[in-house]
Amino acid sequence: MMFGRVKPLDAILATAEKKSLHRSLGAFQLTMLGIGAVIGTGIFVLTAEAAQKAGPGMMLSFVIAGFVCAVAALCYAEMAAMVPVSGSAYTYSYAVMGEVVAWMVGWALILEYAIAAGAVSVGWSGYFIGWLNSSFHIDIPLALVRGPFDGGIINLPAMLIAALVTALLIKGTKESATVNAVLVGIKILALAFFVVLTIPVIKSGQFTPFAPLGFAGISGAAASIFFAYVGFDAVSTAAEETKNPQRNMPIGLIGSLGICTIFYMLVAAGVIGTVGAQPVFGPGGEVLSPGTPSLAQACSSIQDAAVVCSKEALAWTLRQVGYPFVGWLVGAAAIIALPSVILMMMFGQTRIFFVMSRDGLLPEFFSKVHPRFHTPHVITLLTGIFVAIFAAFFPVGLLADVSNSGTLFAFAAVSIAVMVLRRTDPDRKRPFRTPAVMVTAPVAILGCIYLFFSLSFHTIALFVGWAVIGLIVYYAYSRSRSHVGRGHVEVHEGDPDVPPQPVPPVV
């Protein structure tokens, strides 16, 4: 099942074979790594979006999205353990299903990383503006803090935070393990405070009706909430450094996703049970979609704005139930922690571009390294410009959904690659093996397809349009310049002292 030229696994592993990482991570460390990577953007930002689509049923949406992530993660882990090199799903697809699929996966990952960074920037802006208002009673005109699809003109704070993170990436600023651990602790403490203060004052009547828009609404919310789980792949990429990966990888993956799902459901219950989470309807009884001017207008007419109208849902909820100071702390925690998520999203985007450029599929100048900072400054700057544009003019819900479309496509491709490689190369060493792969992988693929088609029609249309543009770019530029197509791929087999030999292109 190959589409176009294949870059052999031995060529991909040639560099990785020169280095061996120390296996030191156990199940607990992997679980903590996953919790730190997953908890963040989605639960802080997208709770209001999910409430507008599913109402109280968003609790079930968290379970559905978490399950799809879990089975996809098990497939992802096998590939990450077998091919522990840069490039993520793009690299795996190149080795197994060929250049065309790899290009499309890399093209889709632009949606996952760059647009996700824009979504987080918009989410950060909502918390920052709310924090300014609650702390210093500073009111900034809506025209300057919301994009045109959200009742404003331009989201300046979101644009500025994206620009700041871009500057940091170009300079080469890195988060130390200590700083990252502190940020993870801040996020978890903020959510723990929220749960402890809201669960005791839940009113059961707020959960009725549980699914005001039926299961279709729950499915739509699950497709959006999927964004809240992106980041679990940080666990799978640590496979090479894991002790006893056959045992510890499933524990780390399923454990972190399970804990996060429970956390998310408790937070959702706290929001729903205290302030309610019913969708907002228009004058004709129609549901007003998130991220549209009509919803913004409806929210402005509601005296006590519903949680679905809030740009900082958790902090707003705490203020509504009589804990303004804790709401201030939760808002401050989001302001402090979310920029690190933007940084990691943009970092991932630039590295995918870097690998694609190194393979000849993108212009060579994309992989240029700054002489002083030693970072891929050209592609980092280009990525930062686009992220700032996305953040300035589009609402968080739309950006998250578009990002999810690219992520779901990439996860489905990895799940297919695992099954294909089991048949085409069954004897290759696998430090981690996906359990019951012929069941787990198809379930992951079907789950990704289900969530993909639960996205809005406009989101699906955007993804299809993006894919068409990608194919045009590939056949007009990339195919003729591919290093694999030109036979410029080296494989080191056996003795590492043997000179590398060129591999002819596979058509």
Image (cartoon, rainbow, N blue to C red):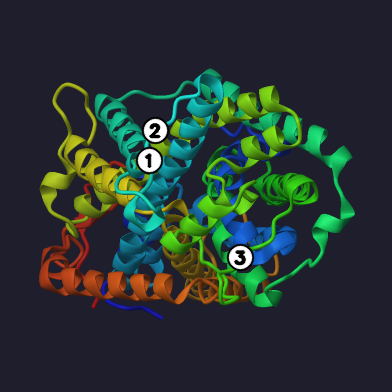
Q: Mark 1 touching mark 2, by CB under 8 A?
A: yes
Marks 1, 3: nearer the viewer: 1
Nearer-the-camera pick, 67 or 335: 335
Dot label at residue 140: 2
* SS of the residue under disc 3: helix
Q: CA distance from mark 2 to mark 3?
A: 28 Å
Q: Residue at x 11, y 45 (%)?
A: 365
- The image's mark for residue 434 is none
Per the image, label 1 sits on a secondary structure element best described as loop
User: Which amino acid lies under the numbered mark 3 shown in the image of this protein?
Assistant: Lys
Decide: is 369 above or below 122.
Answer: above
Q: Which mark is residue 145?
A: 1
In this view, which residue lies farthest toward the bottom?
Answer: 1
**Which one is closest to the eye, mark 2 or mark 3?**
2
Q: For the point 34% across and 42% down, which residue is it?
A: 155
Name the spot of residue 45 as percent of width and height, x first: 55, 45
Across and down, in percent, residue 147 comes to 34, 50
Q: Does dot 2 land on a helix, a strand or a loop?
A: loop
> How many numbered circles are shown?
3
Is 313 positioned to the left or the right of 251 in the image?
A: left
Q: Nearer the viewer, mark 1 or mark 2?
A: 2
Which label sits on residue 53? 3
Q: Name the side, left or right, on which 203 lies relative to 307.
A: right
Q: Earlier in the sequence, mark 1 or mark 3?
A: 3
Q: Amino acid at mark 2?
A: Ile
Between marks 1 and 3, how big is the CA–CA gap? Answer: 23 Å
Residue 167, percent across and down? 26, 28
Q: Whole-percent x and y of residue 81?
A: 53, 50
Q: How busy is the neighbourhood of tag 3: few (under 14 within 10 Å), some, or many (20 plus)? A: many
Mark toward the start of the polypeptide (1 vs 2):
2
Q: Is residue 91 left or right of residue 303?
A: left
